[in-house]
Image: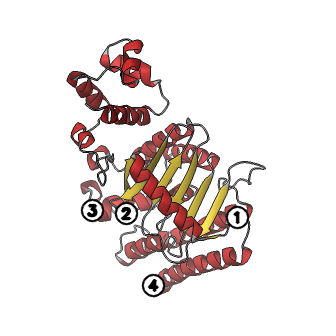
Amino acid sequence: MTRDIQTTLFDIVKSKIAGKDSLGMALSDVLSISQDAVYRRLRGETALTINEIKKICQTYDISFDALIEIKKGNVVFGYPPFDSYDFSLESYLEGILEAFQKLKKLGNAEIILSVNNTQFFQLLNFPQLVRFKLYFWAKTHLHVEEYREQLFKHEKTSERAFELGKEILQIYNAIPSKEIYDPELMRGFLRQVLYYFKSHLFEDPEYAIFLCERSLLFSQHLKEQATVGKKFMFGTEAPASGNEFEMYLNETINTDGTFYYKSNDLEGIYITHNIMNYLQTEDKRYLNDTKHILDKQLANSSIISIVNEKERNNFFYDFDRTINAFKRKIEADLEI
């Protein structure tokens, strides 16, 4: 194993433990060797043996085949496979919370988001919208068998799901973020609501009106955060300091949803994949390319948080008008 590949392997392990333990202590346990012996390997004074490589790859779910093929144009991504989901709101939120808890432990973390249609973390302010989005994904796109004959029901979000969403929001709100939005915000979500209404997939057709009304509250809350440049939970007030929120408007379209994070010790990226799944990597070359593109997107977009009141008002006026247009279509059909 070359020095570069050995170093890359250690970097991957470091990203996976994400501050839960020291790298020396973690590898000492995995390899059953002293920490001094581990640090000789970390410094490159001693090469890893084949058996040690195997233990590390198996313990941390690392593809060695992909590792040794790393070269320009090849990137190793991780992702949660479909069979790891049970498609409940609780299990989906648990996976997101785990990732945010790791990020919270990192020093001076910051986030850049490119929002493609739906800003999921902001949507957590309204659990009913999240519940519908996850249900639509599982039933309509993935054809989960247990949902095949079901209609979408108006049910209260479970206490567990509510608490999970609240924990995620608290961490997300505490981390400064720059977020790039476009004119397509929530259009896809609203089309999903209309599709379920037209297809008679709501147990109570008027629930489609309720989702539109919650979307209007989502718009109002997002605008309030943009106005003061602070993130805060729906139903609370903006903090006196911290929680910086920079909202940018890209007047064309964001072609993907990208979540870039950086801290003193770690840098990585999540990319939306297969509608609501994601890919994740810490590949340095790929991160540099992605950060370069995000910086270009920011430069080509207009900041509408705190400043540029006219552009901010126009954006949210159009957003509200779109939501109300979908709402009127549903109301007109209900009156027939």
Amino acid type of disc 2? Phe
- Can you say which quadrant of the picture contains the C terminus? bottom left
Marked residue nearer the N-terminal end (4 or 2): 2
Q: Is residue 133 left or right of residue 70?
A: right
Name above or below for residue 64 compared with residue 136: above
> What percent of the width, then of the height, locates residue 145?
24, 56
> What percent of the width, then of the height, locates residue 70?
28, 45
Amino acid type of disc 1? Glu
Disc number at residue 316? none
Q: CA distance from mark 4 to mark 2?
A: 21 Å
Label 4 element class = helix
- For the point 68% across and 50% down, the residue is 243
Q: Residue furthest right?
A: 240
Residue indicated by mark 3: 149
The foreground one among 71 and 224 is 71
Residue indicated by mark 1: 224
Q: Residues within 10 Å of mark 3 (few under 14, many from 20)?
A: few
Check if mark 2's residue and mark 3's residue have beta carbons within 8 Å.
no
Check if mark 4's residue and mark 3's residue have beta carbons within 8 Å.
no
The foreground one among 24 and 313 is 24
Q: Is residue 141 left or right of residue 334?
A: left
